Image (cartoon, rainbow, N blue to C red):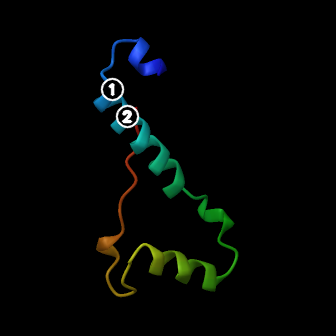
């Protein structure tokens, strides 16, 4: 609603809000991985092959 009040149409603002919400669900502090098993579970969940690290999504900081 706030985005619509500032002139953004319903469609684009809804997509933006959904993207931001999904992004916050994906972010996780890697220091919370306490054991090797935790790391392995996270890598499996993100479909990272143990042999090929090129499939790991890179973090690009925003400016």
Image quarter hosting the C terminus: top left
At a point 49% along the width and 45% down the height, the residue shown is: 21
The spot of residue 23 in percent (x, y) is: 46, 49
Q: Quadrant of residue 48?
A: bottom left
Q: Residues within 10 Å of mark 2 (few under 14, many from 20)?
A: some
Please tell me which residue lies in front, 20 or 4. 4
Residue for point 35% across, 76% down: 53
Q: Nearer the viewer, residue 11 or 25?
A: 11
Q: Which residue is mark 1?
A: 10
Left or right relative to 45: residue 33: right
Task: Please give the count of numbered marks on the rendered protein.
Answer: 2
Location of residue 42 with respect to 62 vertically, above or below: below
Residue 8 horizontal side relative to residue 18, left or right: left
Count residues near mark 1 (Cα–Cα under 10 Å), then give few for <14, some for 14-19, many for 20+. Answer: few
Residue 38 rendering spot, x and y as whole percentages = 62, 79
Residue 39 in the figure: left or right of residue 62: right
CB within 8 Å, label 1 to label 2: yes
What SS does tag 1 mark? helix
Q: In the rendering, at what x and y percent does residue 27 appear?
A: 52, 55
In whole angstroms, how far apart are the C-alphas of marks 1 and 2? 6 Å
Q: Position of residue 45 (x, y in %)?
A: 47, 76
Q: Which mark is residue 14?
A: 2
Q: Residue lying furthest top in this view? A: 6
């Amino acid at each position: 609603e706030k985005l619509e009040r500032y002139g953004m149409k319903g469609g684009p603002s809804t997509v933006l809000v959904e993207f931001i919400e999904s992004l916050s669900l994906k972010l996780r502090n890697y220091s919370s991985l306490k054991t090797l098993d935790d790391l392995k579970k996270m890598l499996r969940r993100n479909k990272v092959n143990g042999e090929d690290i090129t499939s790991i999504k890179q973090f690009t900081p925003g400016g």
